[in-house]
Amino acid sequence: MNLPSELFSLFIGIFCILGLATLIAQVMKSKQGRTPLIDNLIERINAWWAMVLLLGVTMSIGHSAIIVLFTLISFAALREFLTLTKKHKADHYALTISFFIVLPAQYLLVYFDWYGLYSIFIPVYVFLLLPIVSVVRGETEAFLIRISETQWALMICVFSASHVPALLMLDLYEDSSKNILLIAFLIVTVQISDVLQYVWGKLLGKRKIAPSLSPSKTWEGFLGGILSASLIGASLWWITPFSPIVAFFLSLMITLLGFFGGLVMSAIKRDRGIKDWGHIIAGHGGAIDRMDSIVFSAPIFFHIVRYFG
């Protein structure tokens, strides 16, 4: 696949930032020695290197590889989510269908650009048919909780996540190969918002937003991170088909959605008494821990740019 030159420039910038972060972490380690904080910082930076390289290699292969990557991410996220839910042996068939029929079917529909079906497949057909699969087994104990948790897992981990590769199918550029830049814009803006909210929170954070949900989130971190990430998103207008002003407001929208998505997923974790969804990514937790902001912003971003782009 011929990658757009804008994508190369973006990745060079990201590599420079990661290189600087690595250098700073090593200097801190040499001066302060090994501490839990510095070890965690280095672990997080190394994980970012791995994730960025994986995304870069996948994008260089082509659209099919991106869809496969997000299919695997959805599988890992769905497993993390459903591991923490209340289940009965009567749900065996529903779970099997969710993992091995619904999930791949959703991404196949995206691959074939069948918008009329992948946009309603899980919210309508799976929502109505999956309870039937469970109810015919005749087990009614906690039925509503069991089936609702499975449906929520599919909506968050599969339906919402599938809107990231669905951006490849939009008709916004003269050269369709540039659609990959929309994915880069979404992921970079949302993820850098998470990082900057953490940084601003550490530097200036005093007033906590929701101590019982996420003790590390503060109003100072929220406002500083959202605003600075939106400005960075506006500065990335050159990789989008949008003007700087439109890029700013799109960035503001997706970073706000990402923030509240993180709060929602934190509430679920607290309800289940866990700190992280999993341990698949060193220093970051599970797949959902890294995707929680993206899955809340991706569907809205997709439909906004599809209808108004």
Image (tube, grey):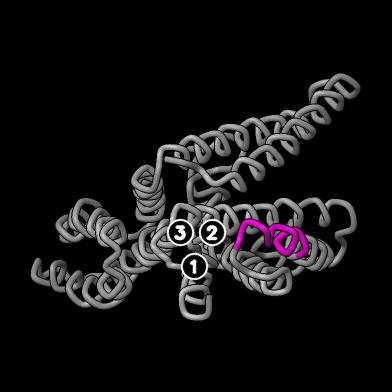
Q: Is residue 144 visible?
A: no
**Image quadrant in which you'd find residue 110:** bottom left
Q: Residue at x 20, y 72 (%)?
A: 131
Q: Is residue 277 visible?
A: yes
Q: Is residue 232 magenta?
A: yes
**Marks 2 and 3: in contact by CB < 8 Å?**
no
Judge left or right: residue 2 versus residue 127.
right
Q: Residue at x 34, y 63 (%)?
A: 154
**Marks 2 and 1: in contact by CB < 8 Å?**
yes
Q: Which residue is mark 3?
A: 164
* Amino acid type, callout 1: Leu
Judge left or right: residue 208 versus residue 10.
right
| Quadrant of image for the N terminus | top left
Q: Nearer the viewer, residue 278 or 117?
A: 117
Where disc 2 sits, the SS reads helix
Q: Which residues are magenta?
A: 231-240
Where disc 3 sits, the SS reads helix
Count the marks: how many? Answer: 3
Q: Which residue is mark 2?
A: 182
Instruction: State which tag comes first along the sequence, 1 or 2.
Output: 1
Q: Which residue is mark 1?
A: 172
Q: Main secondary structure of the magenta part?
A: helix
Rate crowding at label 2 as few (under 14), some (14 to 19) or many (20 or more) other CA atoms within 10 Å: many
Where disc 1 sits, the SS reads loop
Judge left or right: residue 230 versus residue 297.
right
* Amino acid type, callout 3: Val
Of circles 1 and 2, the one toward us is: 1
Estimate the spatial distance between the alpha carbons at disc 1 and disc 3, rounded to whole Å.
15 Å
* Amino acid type, callout 2: Leu
